[in-house]
Image (spheres, rainbow, N blue to C red):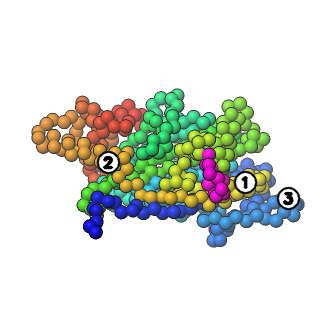
């Protein structure tokens, strides 16, 4: 029987469990000064966390085992290499990936995801992924082309805000379409050319994020933030045609669970805490429903967070969850509750597959536009805007330039590609570039 060449071979699908790691932060100065004791023991070799009571009760210690555990002395780069690196490698191949930090307020979620960006060794997973992604792109050979874009949103009091949007009072809607799944209507997406671009965008969005002081954390995240990097890659396939693969990476810094008695939250802070705890408990219910094997209904729709993370939990994504805990005995109950939560999440099964030639890929559309532009150039038609080059300075100048025909040119480092953006859903505007 002849082989039908048009028929695609089955896409490889990997059935992976959600990877769960635990990180315990050091005792902080306030905890030391108050005289709190360490209640947590981390055995990095065995992958175990043991929590014991420090009072006179005879309760036996409780031990939990995870894929990887990190003690108070752990280094940001080790956390990145052992947990995030494999996920980012998969996203570069065209898989979806999700990395999220979960845990009680003040336990180091933002430190793990973002860290201190100005100090290289204290950078967290998000900034470390920037250099990794563009390092990979710089090494790509042959006809391989990449298009990287980012968006950044927060869910604050159950409302979605575009952290990169011009109008910060605007609230966005969560929508669903059979061909692309769950998405946010009108969310800005920016094409980025290098790690510095990405970092500048993060700084811009970061300024808009909702943060407030509580008794537990001076810089407490009052919203769930999702930094999304979409990487499209076009390459010649075995059939001789160009194929686009598209990986979406969600980097999620959740707001922490908190008890009002400890955080001292009142007024607006209390209202935020109620919403934060509500969406975290929906996340817990989603995890329970996914792993108990009996539930026919998974309550993804009960919160914006779980709706947006639907694919990351039980769907088409390679997912890693970092459960953050504090070491002090006064947080014994919260620590046990986080570890139980994380233990359940280990049993979630995901089915990740390479997203080949997806409908919403922009690279093919851009390449078609480039071809048309080239043809026009050859035919001697005048096209406004200047040709881009590889130098940093010229790159910056180009960022704000929009031609009379409304087309914007962008270039990618390493592979000097001029990308015209016409009436696409990309929001590259000169005013935005000036803001940077
Ligand atoms: N592993 C660590 N090593 C050193 N300092 C840490 C570590 N983890 C957290 N910290 C410090 O602890 C404080 C609280 O951390 P962070 O803001 O990341 O907590 P969080 O879990 O994001 O809290 P929230 O839920 O309130 O947003 C910060 O000052 C942070 O720098
Ligand atoms: Mg935080």
Which residue occupies the foreground of this view, 142 or 210? 142
Question: Quadrant location of the C terminus?
Answer: top left
- Secondary element under disc 2, as helix, strand or loop, is helix
> Residue shown at 67%/41% (left/top)?
278
Disc marking residue 55: 3
Q: Earlier in the sequence, mark 1 or mark 3?
A: 3
| The residue stretch that appears in magenta | 286-299
Q: What is the spatial separation of the Cα atoms under label 3 and label 2, in whole angstroms? A: 61 Å
Q: Earlier in the sequence, mark 3 or mark 2?
A: 3
Question: Quadrant location of the N terminus?
Answer: bottom left
> Residue shown at 85%/58% (left/top)?
55
The residue to which callout 2 is attached is 363
- Secondary element under disc 3, as helix, strand or loop, is loop
| Residue 237 at x, y percent in the picture | 29, 61
In this picture, residue 434 sits left or right of residue 129 = left
* Mark 1 surroundings: few (<14), some (14-19) or many (≥20) residues within 10 A: some
**Is the Cβ of the residue at disc 3 closer than 8 Å to that at disc 2?**
no
Q: What is the spatial separation of the Cα atoms under label 1 and label 2, in whole angstroms? A: 45 Å
The residue to which callout 1 is attached is 337
């Amino acid at each position: 029987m002849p082989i039908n060449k048009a028929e695609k071979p089955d896409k490889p699908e990997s059935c992976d469990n959600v990877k769960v790691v635990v990180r315990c932060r050091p005792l902080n100065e306030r905890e030391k000064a108050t005289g709190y004791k360490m209640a947590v023991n981390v055995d990095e070799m065995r992958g175990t966390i043991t929590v014991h009571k420090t009072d006179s009760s005879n309760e036996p210690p409780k031990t939990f085992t995870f894929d990887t555990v990190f003690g108070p002395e752990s280094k940001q780069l080790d956390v990145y290499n052992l947990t995030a690196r494999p996920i980012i490698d998969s996203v570069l191949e065209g898989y979806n990936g999700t990395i999220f930090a979960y845990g009680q307020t003040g336990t180091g979620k933002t430190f793990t995801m973002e860290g201190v960006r100005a100090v290289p060794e204290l950078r967290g997973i998000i900034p470390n992924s920037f250099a990794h992604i563009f390092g990979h792109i710089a090494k790509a050979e042959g006809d391989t082309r990449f298009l990287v874009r980012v968006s950044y949103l927060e869910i604050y009091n159950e409302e979605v805000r575009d952290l990169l949007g011009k109008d910060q009072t605007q609230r966005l809607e969560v929508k669903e379409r059979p061909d692309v799944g769950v998405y946010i209507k009108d969310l800005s997406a920016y094409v980025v050319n290098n790690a510095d671009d990405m970092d500048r965008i993060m700084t811009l969005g970061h300024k808009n994020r909702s943060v407030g002081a509580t008794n537990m954390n001076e810089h407490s995240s009052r919203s769930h933030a999702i930094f999304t990097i979409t990487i499209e890659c076009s390459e010649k396939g075995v059939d001789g045609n160009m194929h686009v693969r598209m990986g979406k990476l969600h980097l999620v810094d959740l707001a922490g669970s908190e008890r009002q008695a400890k955080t001292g939250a009142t007024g607006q802070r209390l209202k935020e805490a109620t919403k934060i705890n509500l969406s975290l408990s929906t996340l817990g219910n989603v995890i329970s429903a996914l792993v108990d094997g009996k539930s026919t209904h998974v309550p993804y729709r009960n919160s914006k967070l779980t709706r947006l993370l639907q694919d990351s939990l039980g769907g088409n994504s390679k997912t890693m969850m970092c459960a953050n805990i504090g070491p002090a005995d006064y947080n014994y109950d919260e620590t046990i509750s986080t570890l139980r939560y994380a233990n359940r999440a280990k049993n979630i099964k995901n089915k990740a597959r390479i997203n080949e030639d997806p409908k919403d890929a922009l690279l093919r559309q851009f390449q078609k536009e480039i071809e048309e532009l080239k043809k026009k150039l050859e035919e001697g038609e005048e096209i406004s805007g200047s040709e881009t080059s590889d130098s940093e300075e010229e790159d910056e100048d180009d960022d704000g330039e929009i031609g009379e025909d409304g087309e914007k040119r962008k270039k990618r480092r390493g592979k000097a590609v001029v990308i015209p953006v016409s009436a696409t859903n990309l929001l590259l505007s000169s005013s935005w570039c000036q803001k940077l």
